């Protein structure tokens, strides 16, 4: 039987990330600035995923080693190609294609500083380009303020004529509000040919990728425009004020998507959720909270207010209140806070409790274990249903090495205890309040290290005569004797 399925053309993605981004005034290259869980170029690469390309090339230049190291982490299959001198976007793409002589099909070019671009838009641009069989198609947008951007110039019948940089534009062209987003699809062979013909005859003396459109149309190839349905996606970022603007827009987009999927966000304006975070329905996020990195929050959990979770896994129905947490796991129905600090290696079991003003690190609390108040728990395992009294310190550090403390199931440690690691409190053992425990307490024993109490009769009257304390003591004595 004859196959009528037409093969999708082979696609190659080229991301332009060689520029410095001077106006960022930063030691960090512009494309490595972070934005809700990814760098700018990380967002662009994520959107470019929709192209389902057979290969991805990233043109690097300014601080190439930093950009390359980042790519190795977030997009190890991408090939970095060095553009030693940044002679323009056309020059950058030329160098990319020189490094990939076998590329055919469609080449998708994306500026590295357009982080709000959606994968759906990349897919729609590609569909428009490949259906129309154009030699080149540009993603354009109608914007209120086109300042600084390339303008899309159309002829009387609405066909794309050329793209003109603002610096090279007449007053008439500057009045156009349809701009070039810096995202394109090209036929590889035609692009390669046109790139060989670029001039540097422009205000910046650079090879402009945008000149490819006029070159192609002047020899009769079709060139097209795909207008982005939402101009916001095409916003670039040139300085930190613009970056903050993009961050706020992305926050709103992320929050709206989670709310539509069944998450309650009580104050979206003060809730910052990285794009890498996952949330379950009926989770509730209260105001002034940040959920960052590889954080996930289970169904019905309540987070915040005033909580920061970094790489933290929160189970179903847990409550985390006014807390800072990094690299922790909070079990289902566990409770944390207010004012606590969970550090890496913290693992709280089901219904475990870390109360107010508690710091934990490398600490495992089994199901139902409790550290309710004012404690430091470092390098410890605490058994199921054990209770750690207020003000207990797990002294894990001897000045040279860290040591572990093990507290057995349903053990009870009295308030203001120091557990001097390495030490083990057996299951069901008790430790008397105020003890400094450096030796193991076997299961079911009471450990007590404090000195026996001695009361000195009449001390206040003798040593503090004339004070309010002496007065109160005398009154109590008189009443007792009456
Ligand atoms: C470019 C477009 C402009 C468009 C705008 C959208 C050109 C000539 N102009 O202008 O029409 O409206 O993007 O944001 O293409 N880069 C390199 N190597 C270079 C130069 C740039 O890799 O030699 C990279 C930059 O790192 C950046 C991207 O290309 O990621 C765009 O460069 P930029 O200088 O910001 O171009 P614009 O002047 O903004
Ligand atoms: Ca730019």
Image (cartoon, helix red, strand yellow):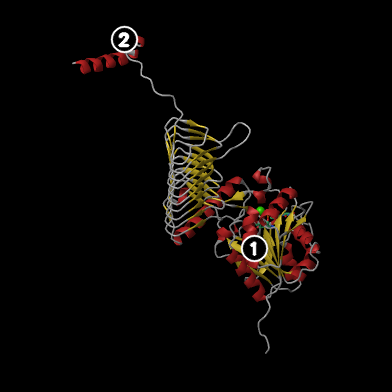
Mark number, residue 280 = none
Residue 236 seen by the camera: yes
> Residue 439: where, in percent of width, then height?
52, 34
> Residue 37: where, in percent of width, then height?
58, 52
First along the sequence among labels 1 and 2: 1
Q: Helix, strand, or loop for circle 1? A: helix
Residue at 59%, 49% in the rendered image:
243
Q: Helix, strand, or loop for circle 2? A: loop
Mark 1 and mark 2 in contact? Answer it, CB < 8 Å: no
Above or below for 478 versus 165: above
Mark 2, residues whose alpha carbon is within 10 Å: few (<14), some, or many (≥20)?
few
Please name the residue that numbered disc 1 is placed on: 48
Nearer to us of marks 1 and 2 is: 2
> Residue 204: where, in percent of width, then height?
74, 52
Please name the residue that numbered disc 2 is placed on: 466
Quadrant location, the C terminus: top left
Q: Is residue 261 left or right of residue 229?
A: left
* Residue 431: quadrant of the picture: top left
Quadrant location, the N terminus: bottom right
> Residue 394: where, in percent of width, then height?
51, 36
Q: CA distance from mark 1 to mark 2?
A: 83 Å
């Amino acid at each position: 039987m004859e196959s009528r399925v037409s093969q999708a053309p082979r696609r190659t993605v080229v991301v332009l990330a060689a520029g410095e981004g001077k106006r960022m005034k930063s030691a960090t290259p512009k494309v490595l600035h972070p934005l809700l869980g990814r760098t700018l170029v990380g967002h662009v690469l994520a959107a470019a995923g929709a192209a389902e390309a057979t290969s991805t090339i990233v043109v690097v230049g300014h601080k190439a080693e930093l950009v390359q190291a980042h790519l190795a982490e977030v997009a190890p299959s991408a090939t970095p190609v060095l553009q030693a001198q940044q002679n323009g976007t056309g020059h950058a793409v030329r160098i990319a294609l020189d490094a990939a002589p076998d590329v055919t099909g469609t080449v998708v070019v994306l500026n590295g500083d357009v982080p709000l671009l959606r994968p759906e838009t990349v897919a729609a641009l590609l569909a428009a380009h490949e259906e129309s069989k154009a030699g080149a198609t540009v993603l354009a947008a109608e914007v209120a303020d086109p300042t600084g951007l390339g303008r899309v110039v159309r002829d009387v019948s609405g066909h794309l004529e050329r793209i003109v940089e603002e610096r090279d534009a007449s007053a008439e062209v500057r009045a156009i509000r349809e701009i070039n987003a810096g995202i394109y699809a090209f036929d590889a062979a035609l692009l390669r040919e046109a790139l060989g013909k670029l001039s540097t005859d422009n205000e910046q003396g650079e090879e402009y990728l945008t000149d490819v459109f006029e070159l192609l149309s002047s020899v009769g190839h079709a060139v097209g425009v795909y207008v982005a349905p939402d101009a916001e996606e095409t916003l670039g970022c040139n300085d930190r004020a613009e970056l903050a603007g993009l961050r706020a827009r992305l926050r709103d987009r992320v929050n709206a998507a989670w709310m539509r999927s069944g998450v309650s966000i009580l104050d979206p304006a003060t809730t910052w959720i990285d794009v890498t975070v996952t949330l379950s329905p009926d989770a509730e996020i209260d105001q002034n909270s940040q959920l960052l990195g590889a954080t996930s929050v289970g169904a019905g959990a309540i987070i915040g207010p005033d909580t920061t979770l970094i790489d933290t896994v929160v189970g179903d129905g847990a409550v985390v209140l006014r807390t800072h947490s990094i690299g922790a796991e909070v079990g289902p129905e566990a409770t944390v806070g207010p004012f606590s600090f969970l550090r890496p290696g913290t693992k709280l079991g089901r219904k475990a409790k870390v109360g107010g003003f508690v710091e934990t690190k490398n600490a495992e609390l089994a199901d139902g274990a409790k550290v309710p108040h004012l404690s430091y728990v470092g390098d410890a395992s605490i058994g199921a249903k054990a209770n750690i009294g207020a003000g207990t310190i797990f002294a894990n550090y001897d000045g040279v090495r860290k040591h572990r403390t093990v507290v057995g199931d349903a053990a009870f440690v009295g308030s203001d205890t120091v557990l001097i690691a390495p030490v083990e409190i057996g299951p069901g053992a008790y430790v008397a309040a105020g003890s400094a425990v450096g030796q193991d307490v076997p299961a079911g024993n009471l450990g007590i290290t404090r000195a026996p109490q001695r009361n000195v009769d009449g001390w206040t009257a003798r040593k503090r005569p004339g004070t309010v304390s002496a007065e109160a003591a005398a009154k109590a004595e008189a009443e007792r004797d009456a």
